[in-house]
Image: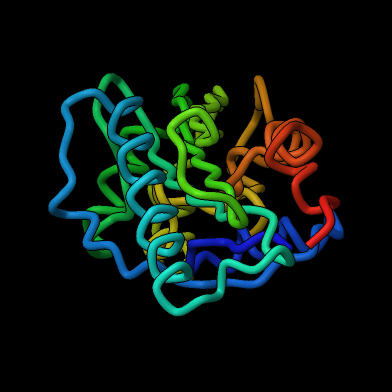
Amino acid sequence: MLVLASASPARRRLLEQAAIPHRVQVSGVDEEVIQDPDPTQLVQLLARAKAQVVWQGMQQVGLGEPACTAVLGCDSLLVFEEEVFGKPADADEARSRWLRMAGGWGELITGHCLMPGISPLLEGNVQIAVVTTRLQFAAINAEEIATYVASGEPLQCAGGFALEGRGGLLVERIEGCYSNVIGLSLPLLRRWLTGPIGRQSAAPG
């Protein structure tokens, strides 16, 4: 069973829809203390920190049993015009961002870190990758932006939109992995779980 080191309902739904057995263990990592000017490096650092905190907690309390295939940590950011957009701090910030983004292109980048759940932590066993998806946003007007922001959805999401929610109406074009925009790349996870780490779940206990 996969352990998801994330409080994101969207990531949990992706795993449920893909019929991947999992449970959720929130890391509690303070994301504000982890900084890097390169967004690609930043999402990797955050994803690894989340996975590592949960992995270490499992070992300490003896939960690293063979039934746990691996621990997955993820973190997503939107890069627009070379500026990093995480979750908007408030409605005003969400509104100002959308006034800039409307009609433009951005990149949703997600860092993924998979740590083995049933073997000693060895550097070679840790999988880390970043998946980038390009998005073109709809050229919506100020009234449409205000309506979307008033829904509250933008305040819960990296980049200020949820592709699987109302925000899906506001994305004109996607180049790359669709599920990555929602929170994690299912194709990447499939490759990982059918590789050496994933096959550990079939090993005798």
Q: Identify the residue shown where x is 57% and y is 26%.
A: 133
- Comparing 196 with 127, the one in front is 196
| Viewport quadrant of the C terminus | bottom right
Q: Is residue 146 above or below residue 150?
A: above
Quarter of the rendering containing residue 42: top left
Q: Identify the residue shown where x is 55% and y is 27%.
A: 131
> Residue 8: where, in percent of width, then height?
52, 64
> Residue 177: where, in percent of width, then height?
68, 29
| Viewport quadrant of the N terminus | bottom right
- Comparing 133 with 23, the one in front is 23
Q: Is residue 149 above or below residue 169?
A: below
Q: How many marks?
A: 0
> Residue 75: where, in percent of width, then height?
43, 46
Left or right: 193, with 53 as reference point: right
- For this orientation, the residue located farthest to the front is 205
Describe the colour scheme in one phrase: rainbow
Quarter of the rendering containing residue 19: bottom right
Q: Is residue 52 above or below residue 190?
A: below
Q: Is residue 82 above or below residue 169?
A: above
- For this orientation, the residue located farthest to the bottom is 61
Asked if one can make out residue 178 in the rendered structure from this viewpoint, the answer is no
Left or right: 109, with 133 as reference point: left
Q: Identify the residue shown where x is 57% and y is 61%.
A: 4
> Residue 160: where, in percent of width, then height?
40, 51
Left or right: 188, with 100 as reference point: right
Q: Identify the residue shown where x is 72% and y is 56%.
A: 14
- Comparing 109 with 29, the one in front is 29
Asked if one can make out residue 29 in the rendered structure from this viewpoint, the answer is yes
